Structure formats: C-alpha cells, structure tokens
Amino acid sequence: MRAFDYARPSTLVEAFELLSAPDGGVKALAGGTDLLVGLRNGAIRPRAVVDLKHIRELAPVIRADKECMSIGANAVLAQLTASEGLRRDYPALVESAAVVGSVQIRHRATLAGNLCNASPAADTVPALLAYGADVVIRGPSGERRVSVDNFVLGPRETVLTAGEIVTTIVLPTPKPGTGAAFARLTRRRGVDLAILSVCCLVDPEGEVRFGLGAVGPRPFLVRDSAAAVVSSTAAEQFAALVAKASPITDVRASHDYRQAMITVLARRTLAAAIERSSWVSP
Amino acid sequence: MNAGSVGTGVPRVGGRERVNGSQQFLADIRLEDMLHVKLVTLDVACARIDSIDTSIAVHLPGVACIVTPADLPQPMPRFGPVYRDRPFLADGATTYHGEPVCAVVAESRDMAEAAAEAVLVGYTEVPGVFTIDAALAQDAPLVQSPSLRPDDPLARSNVLRERRYEWGAIDETDTTVVDHVYSFPMVTHFAIEPHGAIAHADDDGLTIWSPVQHPYLLQRTISDLFEQPLARVRVLAPDPGGAFGGKQNPKFEPLLTWIALKTGRPCRLILTLEETFQAVRRTSCSIHVRSGFRANGELVFHDVESDFLVGAYADIAERVVAKANYLACGPYRTPNARIVARAIFSNTTPSCAFRGFGTPQVAWAIESQMDAASRLLQLDGLEIRRANLARFGEDVVPGDVPADGEWQQSLDRAAEMIGWGRPPLEGRGRGIAVAIKAGATTGLSQATVRLLFDGSVIVYAGTSDMGQGARTIFAQIAADEFGVTVNDVSVVSGDTAIVPFDLQTSASRSTVFMGNAILAACEDVHRQLRSLAAEITGLEAADVEIKGGQVHVKGEQHSIATVLERGLGRLRGELVGNGTVRRADDPDHPLGGAPAFYEFNCTAFEVSVDGETGEVLIHRHVTVGDVGRALNPLQVTMQDEGAAIMGLGHSLMEQLLLDDRGRIRNLGALDYRIPTTKDMPLELESEVIENGDGPGPRGSKGVSEGAILCTAPALAAAVADATGVVIRDLPLTPERVWSALKAGVAR
Ligand SMILES: Cc1cc2nc3c(=O)[nH]c(=O)nc-3n(C[C@H](O)[C@H](O)[C@H](O)COP(=O)(O)OP(=O)(O)OC[C@H]3O[C@@H](n4cnc5c(N)ncnc54)[C@H](O)[C@@H]3O)c2cc1C
C-alpha cells in the first residue's frame, strides 16, 4: 500500500478545507470497507485520507422526524438493521442493509459510504431509490439536497464536487399501508457482491416502484403508476424493467443470466411487497 | 486408558494457539536486519521480455538491490521435484500470468513495493495456450522449449507425458454404452496463510524458513542448487497455515537463498493472496469416458481419455495425472479398462498437488458415468454401486493391491444416513457416490523418541503439522506406549537440523508412515527398558514385558518412571530410540510402487433446486470414510468435514476464470468464491467405519482427503434427481444450473 497523509478533523468546516485541496488527491474515509480495498489494490492512490468519523456534526444517529427518517452519514449498517423505526417503516431498506458483507462489515460500513462509493451493485441503493430518499450534501459553498436517483451518475461517479460531504440521507415516511421488499442474487450465500438486486415498493393505491441494482452502470428506478404490474404477474409485465436495464457480462454472471433474473426477482419482490401492503386488487 | 489415549478425541495440540492468534506463522517471524523482497510481475500471461530498466527504482528510498535475470548465473538455474524446469525468475519470457520477472529487495515491504512499481519492463506480448484445445492444436506455440526435455519424443508438443493403463479387452457386445465428456475447473488452494519464505546465509550455512510440507525436499533442493552439504542447509518449517498440497515443493526459496547470499542479510518474501493465486492451483481437466454395462448394471468396461491441463512448469502435476488416472475406474470390479491420460502444458499457473491429488477430477467423470448408466438401466445410484463395488480382497486394478476395506459398509451406512429408499419430499433429490484414492506408494519416515528420566517423552517427527493434527496423533501414540498422558509428551518438528528425515507430508500418509516409525522408535526404547528392568531385577530381558505403558516383570507391575529412576540412577540420563519406516520403490509397478492403502469415501446429498434461479440448496450432506481406526475421532471428523466443505467449493462455486489472453480475471478474495459458513449444508454429518484393517498404528488408514473425492458427482446426481437435468461441467453455479434447466438437457 502506498503511504498517504491521514487527517481526522472534528468539524465539517475543517473537513471541507481538507477535502477541497486543489490537487484532488484527497479521499473521504467513513467505514473504509470500500476505500481500503481500493487503497490496497492500488485502484485509488490518494495523497491524503480524511477520516469523517470524528466530525461532531456527523453523529452516527438515525432520527425520526416529522414526515421523514434521517440517517446520519456516520451511521453504520448494523445500526440500520437494529433500528425499530426502520424495521417497521422501511423493511426493504433493512433487508438490503442486512445482506451487505458480513456482521463485521456491517458494524463498520456506513449507509452513506455504500451510496457515495457509487458501485452499480451497491445493495442499499435500490431500496433508497424505491423509498424516494434524498441526500443532504454540505460543502464549502453551503448545503444542497438531491434525490438518490440524481445523486449517482455512473460507476464510481456521483454529483459530489471537491470538498463536498454527504451529511444525511433522508427517507420520506411511506404512506400507511405501503409494502416493500428487497431481494438479491449472489454466487454464494455468505459475503458476496450482488449479481443483481431488486427492491419493490407498492403503495396503498397500487403504485409500484422498482429499484434495480447491478444491471446497469448505476442503480436505477422504474415506476409504474398505472398499477399494471400489480394486476398481473405475467412475465411480460416486467418488460419495462428489462428494457431499462443494460446488464453486462462479468466474473459474477453473464448478461443473459442477469437479464433473465430481473423478471424472477421482480416477480418475487412484487409478491412480497403486495403481501406487506394494504393494497388489494380491484 | 490414560487421558489422551489413542481412540479419544483430545483437542488438537496447537489448536488453541491457532485460534487465539499466538501461533507464530512464517509472517510473524522477524529477524534482525531483515530485507524484504517484492517480485515484479506483468499484467500479461505470455510476453517476451525486451528490457528491464531498474535505473529509477534502484535509487528509491530503502532499496538494497534489484535482482534481474542478468544477475543470476547463466544458464538460469532451474529446479523441480521431478522435472528441473522451473527457473529462479522468468527466463527471457514470462510463460504464465504473474510469473516473476525480477525481484526488488528493500528495507521494508512498502519500500520494496514502491520500487517494484518503478521498475520499467519492456515486453512484447506473444501468443500463448490457455486451454486444452489450444495447447493441442496443430501449430500451437510451445509452452516449454524442447531443449528442456532433450530426449523426449514429445518435447515438440505441449504434451508433457502420456500414460496408458490397460487391462482386459474392450468389447461392446451386449452392453449398454454411455459416452460423455466431463470438465473440471481450475481452482486454487486458498490456504488462509499466503505463501512465503525467509532465507539467510551466514558462517553456519544456509537457513531457510518456509511453511513447506516437505522440509527435507527443500533442504535437498537448496543443497543441490547451491552445492552445499545437507548438513549446512537448515530448513525451519513453521506450521503452515493451511497448505492442501500447495506448499509441497519449493517455489521461491531458491531465489531467496540466492538473494540472501548476495546481500548477506536475511531476506523475506511474503506473497499477497493474489500472488498466491498466481503461484499454485489444482489441475483442471476434460475427461471423455465411454463405458459399457450389462442390463443388470454390471460394469463391463471403461474407456477413458483423460486430458489434464497442467501449468507452465511441471511441478508435481504429472504425478497427479499418473496416480489419479491409474485408479480412474474407482473402487469397483472393472474387468476391462483402457485409460489414456495426458498431462498437457499450458501458459497458466503451474498446477501442483491439491487435496485429493487428481482423484476428485477422475471421480467426477467416472461416478457421473455410473449415474448416467443407472438412469439408462432404470437402476438407482445405490443399486448400481452395490452391484459393482469391490468386496474386500477383490481386485480394483487387476494384479495390484486388492480392496483393503469392507467398502460396502460405508456405502450402506451413507445410504442409510441420507434416507435412501424413502421417498424424498417434493422437489428434493438425492445422490450418492464413492471414490478411492491411492495412499502413498513409496515413503520413508524416521522418528526419534527420547524417554526422559521422569518418564516424560519427546518425539522428533518431521511431519509438517498444517492443520491435520499430526502432532496430536503422534503425542497420543507415544503417550500410550509409555503410560503417560498427552501432556507428558512433546512433539518436535519443523527443523531439519534436529529432527530426523521424513520424505513428505502428503497423501494422507503421516499417521500411517510416521505413526509406525514412532511406534518403532518406542519399541526401540522398550527394548532398552527391558534390559534396564532385567538389570535391576537380575532377571533376563526376556522375562520383562512392556504392556499398556507398564513394565511387567514376572507377574509384578512397575511404572516406567520407577524403572527409569532405579535403572538410570543418580547420574540420570535417558533412553533414546529410533524408528524407520521404509516403503521402497518398485520399479516394475506403473506408479513406482503399490499404494500402501486406499482411502475410501462415500458421500451422499439431499438437495433442492430453485427452478427459476438455479440456486442449489443442500438439505443434507453425509460422508462416511473407511478409516481403519479413528485414532482421534475428533480430528477424523474435523478432517472429514473440512474435506467435505472444500469439496463443495469446486462443486458449487470455485473456478479461476481466465480472459482470452490467459490473465486471471478473478484474482483475489472478492471474486474467487469459496464456501463460507452461510454456504454450509443445512445438515452435514460425518461418520467412520472402523474395522482395524489399515497398515497404520492400530489398523488405521489415512483419512484427510476422503470426503473431497466424490463430493461433486454425488451433488450433481442429487441435482439431476431433483430436476431431471444432468450437468457435466463444474462448478454447478446458479447460472450454470439455470442454463441447463433452460436448455432442458436430456438425461
Ligand atoms: C468483505 C466485503 C464485503 C462487502 N459486501 C458488500 C455487499 O454485500 N453489498 C454492498 O453493497 N457492498 C459491499 N461491500 C462494500 C462496502 O462494505 C459498502 O459499500 C459500505 O457500505 C461502504 O461504506 P464505508 O463506510 O465503509 O465507506 P468507505 O469505504 O469509507 O467509503 C466509500 C466511498 O464513499 C466515500 N464516502 C464515504 N462517506 C462519505 C460521505 N459522508 N460523504 C462523501 N463521500 C463519502 C469515500 O470517499 C469512498 O469513496 C463489501 C465490502 C467488503 C470489504
């Protein structure tokens, strides 16, 4: 591993300054479960690493607010899976957090890190998409808020600019009677990256949203407001999902397999989401 | 019975240290003034090396020197356990992905790494062969220069060697013929401890630290290459953190020794996991079998064409091919057989020994053939095996050692454990398979036992304890011979300067070979004890008997400690015994010697398959080994479970994937999958059959490979039973099963 400088700021302002170094060779560090892999195999070679874990404003909290749930940038996935509020209102997000890595990884890995790493296969992102989550970003020039859908641009690419930090991920409170479910497929059952992942959300009026991971350059959202999907389980109804996907062939799976599995997981998550929702077929 | 006696499941000697982190593995050893070595490799498989520019790198901080091929003696020295074909560094060209081009030596590992990146290697990629078909093609590029095999008629091909075994005559009259091709992937050993070594040269000679399975072979190799007497080459072999066959033979130790001589300082190389992947692997293969059966299921013949893709250097791979294919037809009465087995070079990671030594590959083919036949003949997997399994004393290879176990007992027990014959639940399927592996064919193990004044014992045994628990068994054996507990015995190994010779730690041999050598050494001490007791009592040595760790003199019983105290007297002293077990070469045998025993296993599964995704769920996995005697039942179970789980790897998920230029695409722990605790069968059970019919102490046989031998065919048979779809290529990944289901592969 290449040597690098390490800084551990205690305020956001300090962090902004460190991270906006003009050479761009600075990386933010949360749990490090993605960053360290990159550092070790040489995929990234930052001059300096800025540890976010001791920033006062980024307390690792999950807080229920009016109309929303806020997850602080330093909250780790194990906190998510243990949170009563999330388990009750965002079961699909909890399901997705619960499959990331292993127990050890989940005690270290943050939700924000999973999102900011911008992997096409990031497991929590399809759920964040389906729940309509927003990302609160702060930087040298203030605060902005973008939807998760607009946050990830492509593989390893987000809208973050030099010096910017994600401080919070905000999930709107789902309408009562909403059901959602997450499923993924892997080559083995323990610790693996997704071949593909799907989150389906069904609201009480029958509107359906699918978040899909690992079948395109970034996780993406497909909405179906006409309730067409819900009224049928026939494979053709998932054509919209398949049409929007552009799966690749890699060491984990082939294009064909990924493509075919979209329908399988979509059907399964849809059935589970309907089951959990108050929506009834007219 | 004393605590820890043979037959009891004493916990493993050193087990606690392995778990709590206090065990000193190679990488924990720090020597004063030690230098660190980083190998420079290219991200290409086959390349002609045009230039190596070290001018920048050599001036980077901490760099002691950079060793390029030009610095080495010319022609480049080569070594290998059978063929001396492996150079210290890539000799003018790289012949596989990751072959080291030069070595950077620096004050720290980080400095060595940084400098390694600054070495500029000019190279031209050249075509290579990465598959069996490519290697055998008409004008395929040669992996090795014919000059390395001057008298070999095959030298102008990529075939390293072809073996033919034949008996009876193949006659298809009145037979049902099944004819299929089976493939087995490249897999890597994935020992948790990466490979590495330390070398040091000083006035006392050469010292090599290496977690090697064969310390005495390493000693000989270094002695030969550097023209030093054996007495001036000392190999210290810390317990390997897993080896599985990958750490048998020298790899980088000769280069390190050369660097140590050059620098005069201890030099250390620890590979990364990724580099380890590029250093060792299991032989992949494609096996075409044509088999004939009578309508009642009786096996008439197997006609086997076995092509094993070995790597760019021979290592021990040809022996793998020869030995596994010799027993390709398995534990059956096979009246007629023709086996043609080829070891084929390719521009890939040198393949070497791997738990099972080629048997998992051949058993995959032959056992799947048994199932193919059973389906055609409307028998079931158990019936066809019962009909053909060799009974005790019957031939498997005519004229060789006959069946040395009541193998049908294992088959019946495994069938019972899996519930064979009871209808499975909806959607479930079952499969069963058997296999034998030849134990060691030759061997030499020497042991020294010191019975100390107070009755405690030190055993010197050169077996490498790589997790199989050799030390524990040895302590148990000696404890019983001297009537003490295992805590009164210490076992010393891993130092060629003080521990007597042992040929190898391989082929599940140590309990049998070294175990018997220790018994012989104990007997040597017993002889001396008898004389001592006779001297004290004024009787004849013949009147003294040593039984159950006690000295019996004419109806009186004395503890050994009493006899020692009285016999050795005020000046104390001790008794020292030596034991040797030698199994000499048999030049007339196709393998150079008949197997010392067969390792027999029966494995069975119950599975269900997700018809939409192709995911296999193992509800039950049972394995039964014919072990002769379980000297330590706990260790036998652990070895058997470990082998079973390792077998799930190549059966379900493990495979090294190459791109079309021969580069490994899934290098490292992220994309090379091995089973985790979450991939365990819902139930896994291991049992043994004990008839005391082995050649080892108390009738034991070797046990640590059995459960990996036929995992794949038993699993695939269960998948076929559950789905109606037969798969002949491993591993059975969800995607492969899904494709097969989709294609509806016919039975
Ligand atoms: C063994 C193993 C298994 C894994 N399994 C899975 C899996 O099953 N599914 C899965 O999706 N992932 C998996 N991962 C990847 C990883 O664990 C997750 O993506 C994790 O959520 C990353 O979070 P982190 O806090 O460790 O991020 P870090 O590694 O600290 O950071 C990741 C990236 O995000 C940036 N970053 C982090 N926080 C912020 C912030 N607040 N603002 C701006 N940028 C930020 C960093 O600069 C870096 O580029 C695995 C990793 C390992 C090592």
Image: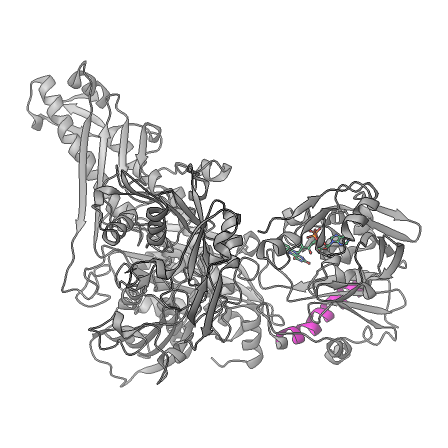
Q: Count the labels in the image.
A: 0
Does the stretch in magenta take in B191? no
**Quadrant in which ligand 1 is drawn:** bottom right
Horizontal placement of B425 versus A241: left or right?
A: left
Res B96 → quadrant: bottom left
**Is B660 in front, or is A174?**
B660
Q: Main secondary structure of the magenta part?
A: helix
**Is A203 in front, or is A109?**
A109
**Is A57 in front, or is A11?**
A11
List x then y, in percent, for residue B224: 23, 53
Q: Residue furthest top?
A: B570
Q: Residue furthest right?
A: A66
Does the stretch in magenta take in A266? yes
Name above or below for residue B639 compared with residue A197: above
List x then y, in percent, for residue B286: 39, 74
Name above or below for residue B128 compared with residue B448: below
Over which residues does the magenta segment extend? A257-275
Name above or below for residue B215 compared with residue B145: above
Name above or below for residue B592 compared with residue B136: above
**Is B708 in front, or is B425?**
B708
